[in-house]
Amino acid sequence: MPRSRFSGSLSSPKVDLIVDMGNPFLNLTVDGFLKIGTVAAAKVAAEETYHIVKRGNVSKHNFELSLKKMCKEGAYWGTVAGLYVGMEYGVERIRGTRDWKNAAIGGALTGALVSAASNNNRDKIVMDAITAGAVATAAEFINYLT
């Protein structure tokens, strides 16, 4: 029986933006804001394009609403990412070591702050802190594996 194999590699282009604010903390925070904010805006752009094509209706009003939604989501997720990166770096500087615990603590602090900014329920804030810490820790472990 004939067999065939496919061999090769798949890679995406690497785009890197270097931001120099004169301080490593600010550099990382702004870098996180810009990268994740751009991803969030691109996600919304793709979703809105799909909805516009599905409706078959392109108008100036729909375009303006889509642009506002892109900016809002980009700013929100960029702020969360910048806050997390800054927290993780700050914890690393305070602890004097670079390990997975920084991600756990930084994620928990970020989750608590973001939740507290939009919520008064203490139980929800604690749950969001635990969730964000767990997600950040898992992402850090996955990053070590690759």
Image (spheres, rainbow, N blue to C red):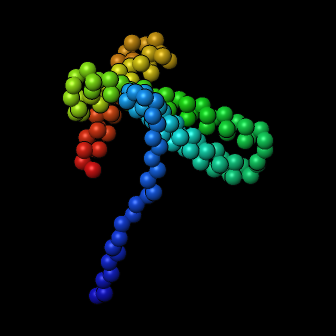
Q: Please, which residue is most extreme toward the bottom here?
A: 1
Q: Is residue 63 above or below residue 111?
A: below
Residue 36 appears in view: no
Rendering coords of residue 49 (x, y %): 65, 49
Nearer to us in this view, 54 or 109: 109
Is 126 left or right of 61, judged from the image as shown? left
Name the residue: 50% across, 36% down: 34
Rendering coords of residue 31 (x, y %): 45, 35
Name the residue: 29% across, 31% down: 103
Residue 5 appears in view: yes
- What is the tally of numbered marks visible in this picture? 0
Rendering coords of residue 20 (x, y %): 45, 34
Name the residue: 38% across, 19% down: 112
Is 82 left or right of 87, judged from the image as shown? right
Nearer to us in this view, 29 or 38: 29
Would you identify the image quadrant in which residue 128 lies? top left
Quadrant of the frame with the N terminus: bottom left
Q: Please, which residue is most extreme toward the front here?
A: 22
Is 103 left or right of 59, judged from the image as shown? left
Name the residue: 28% across, 34% down: 137
